[in-house]
Amino acid sequence: MSRPIRRELLTWEDVDELMDVLLGQLREAGTFDALLMITRGGIIPGGMICEALDIRDVLTASVRFPSVIGTQPLAAWPEFLQFPADEIMQGRRILIVDDVWGSGRTSTAVRGRVEAAGGKPATCVIHFNPYRSLFEKAQPNYYAAITDAWIVYPWEVDRNIDRIPSRPAGFN
């Protein structure tokens, strides 16, 4: 029987501290020609990074993996729902951003597609989970922390939107 996965709920202050670590690494790495954020997890950290590093060419990639393929659910080929044109990436240094490297499938699929287009990719995540990674010799180029937990970021917290009253108490 496998043990349950530990969950870790982060605050915005936790994210700020992790972003400081990550931004230090990225500043040392030099400039990037564009930032490619992976939806949905990479949208918020990608926005924070491009703002902090003044990266103005911001691109998005949307990748989906089939939920089950026979008896090998993690061996499925990715479906790219949205991806920049090859010409946009050719010869350019592209920073690929996601929130977590768990299995590593999404980041490595996006990196491979950028390489195939002639780009020079570097992968970046807030959390790297080497214990779940499917790739022994691959890891993100930049990451703020190593974890074995299921990370819940503050933007993923259930805000109970349906329970918010249409009018604040005392408002007429």
Image: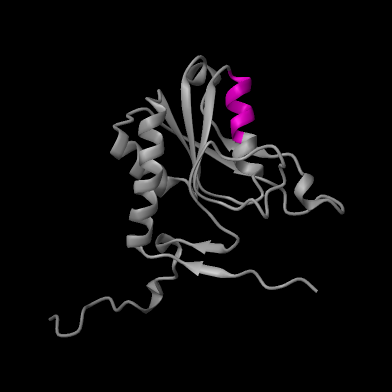
Q: Tell me what residue is drawn at x 76 percent, y 71 percent.
A: 2
Task: Farthest residue to the right: give it.
Answer: 71
Location of residue 98 in the rendering, given as x and y in whole percent from the top left corner: 50, 45
Q: Tell me what residue is drawn at x 40 percent, y 75 percent.
A: 162
Looking at the rendered image, the quarter that the C terminus falls into is bottom left
Q: Which residues are magenta?
A: 110-117
Looking at the rendered structure, the number of numbered marks drawn on it comes to 0
Q: Nearer the viewer, residue 142 or 84?
A: 142
**Res 153 → quadrant:** bottom left
Q: Is residue 159 left or right of residue 8?
A: left
Say if the magenta span includes residue 156: no
**Res 75 → quadrant:** top right
Q: Is residue 98 left or right of residue 169?
A: right
Q: Is residue 130 left or right of residue 23?
A: right
Location of residue 26 in the rendering, given as x and y in whole percent from the top left corner: 40, 35
Task: Farthest residue to the left: give it.
Answer: 172
Residue 1, placed above or below residue 109: below
Q: Is residue 125 left or right of residue 32?
A: right
Looking at the rendered image, the quarter that the N terminus falls into is bottom right
Q: Tell me what residue is drawn at x 60 percent, y 60 percent.
A: 148
Location of residue 165 in the rendering, given as x and y in whole percent from the top left corner: 29, 79
